[in-house]
Image (cartoon, coloured by chain):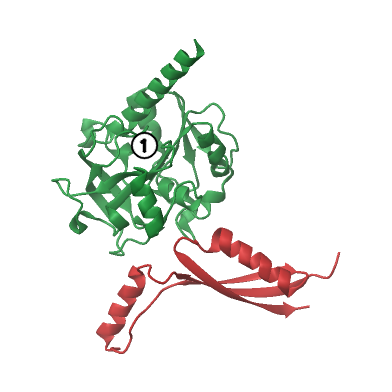
Chain colours: A green, B red
């Protein structure tokens, strides 16, 4: 399975992401400069965290017009996996590949700490190695993670199982006190209708080996490999 | 080619009504603590000034509207208004 990590000016989680795929998963991975126009040959593209284009105007607003982002809809249409982490999630929202928008954290403070997440959908390409309702820990580091979607969109997301992660308490309760940024419905991650595009504010590329003090993020990466392997098997069966 | 005139667009981008504005709330808190008790609400927005060439005002307005819809405002959470003035001919 071939991974690509998009690099914008001021991406800063690109090397962490590259490291997970290369050293921990042991799969081929390349950096993709944002001026590139083609995603041919890639199976999964990651938009990493950072401050693309300095977050000028709005987080993700300028990055969304980068040639490589314009290539994402066709890539996703072909079944490619797209994972937007933190700033990458913001870019996906600005690009309209996921619904909703990010507002400034309700505290007005940049939040850099661990949060607890409840896995709301364990059937996506990115979460199938978790259990439904499992509580996991991941770090966040953002000033604009206050997710918003209008009531109709929210209802649609709920109905279609597209809310993938919510901020929760240790007991898995969805409480205001567990919400680090004011996000509506404690939403930390949402996916596309087909499930092959995921955006999330927490950083699974910062918690995958015990030396980092937390391995809860590894499930995201293992899910991707597992899902891709299963998809390839099905394709092989169909082609027999 | 026709004559191109220079226009200035003054664009105001604000959070939609009903979208919580934490910055506005913090600014209001500041004003409150300074003793300006009469302030009922504060909303913080963005103000952009664009200089652009266009054959006429109508086309300048049309292109500013398109820029707002596509980039300068996020229609999910923001509204915008603008005024376009000719600065030279």
Chain designation of label 1: A
Q: Is residue B28 above or below residue A2?
A: below
**Position of residue B63 measured from the top left corner of the image (x, y, whole percent):** 67, 65
| Image location of residue A153, percent across then percent down | 41, 54
Q: Residue at x 51, y 28 (%)?
A: A42
Quadrant in which the N terminus of chain A is drawn: top left
- In the picture, residue A38 is in which quadrant? top right
In this view of the protein, can residue A201 be seen by the observer? no
Q: Residues within 10 Å of mark 1 (few under 14, many from 20)?
A: some
Q: Residue furthest left?
A: A171
Compared across the picture, whether A171 is left or right of A1 comes to: left
Tell me the residue that label 1 is attached to: A16
Rendered position, A185 above or below B77: above
Q: Quadrant of residue A215?
A: top left
Q: Is residue B74 left or right of residue B59?
A: left
- Residue A126, x across and y down, in percent: 35, 34
Residue at 86 percent of width and 64 percent of height:
B1
| Closer to us: A112 or A3 | A3
Pick out the residue farthest to the top.
A240
Query: x%, y% of residue A112?
Result: 27, 52
Element on which disc 1 rests: helix
Task: Note whether residue A25 is visible.
Answer: yes
């Amino acid at each position: 399975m071939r991974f690509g990590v998009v690099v914008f000016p001021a991406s800063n989680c690109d090397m962490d992401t590259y490291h997970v795929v290369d050293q921990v998963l042991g799969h081929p991975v390349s950096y993709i400069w944002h001026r590139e126009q083609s995603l041919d040959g890639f199976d999964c593209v990651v938009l990493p965290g950072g401050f693309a284009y300095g977050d000028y105007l709005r987080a993700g607003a300028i990055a969304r017009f980068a040639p490589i982002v314009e290539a994402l809809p066709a890539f996703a249409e072909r079944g490619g996996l797209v994972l937007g982490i933190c700033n990458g999630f913001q870019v996906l929202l600005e690009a309209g590949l996921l619904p909703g928008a990010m507002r400034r954290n309700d505290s007005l403070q940049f939040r850099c700490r661990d949060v607890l997440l409840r896995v709301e959908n364990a059937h996506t390409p990115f979460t199938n190695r978790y259990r439904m309702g499992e509580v996991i820990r991941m770090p966040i580091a953002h000033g604009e993670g206050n997710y918003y979607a209008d009531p109709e969109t929210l209802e649609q997301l709920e109905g279609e199982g597209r809310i993938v992660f919510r901020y929760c308490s240790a007991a898995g309760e969805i409480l205001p006190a567990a919400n680090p940024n004011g996000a509506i419905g404690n939403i930390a991650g949402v996916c596309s209708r087909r499930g092959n595009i995921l955006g999330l504010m927490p950083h699974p590329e910062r918690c995958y080996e015990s030396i980092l003090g937390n391995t809860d993020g590894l499930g995201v990466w293992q899910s991707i490999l597992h899902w891709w392997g299963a998809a390839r098997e099905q394709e092989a069966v169909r082609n027999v | 080619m026709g004559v191109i005139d220079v226009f200035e667009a003054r664009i105001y981008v604000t959070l939609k009504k009903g979208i919580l504005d934490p910055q506005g709330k913090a600014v209001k808190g500041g004003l409150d603590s300074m003793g300006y008790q009469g302030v009922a609400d504060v909303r913080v927005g963005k103000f952009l000034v664009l200089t652009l060439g266009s054959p006429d005002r109508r086309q300048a307005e049309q292109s500013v509207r398109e820029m707002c819809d596509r980039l300068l405002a996020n229609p999910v959470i923001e509204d915008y208004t603008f005024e376009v003035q000719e600065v030279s001919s």
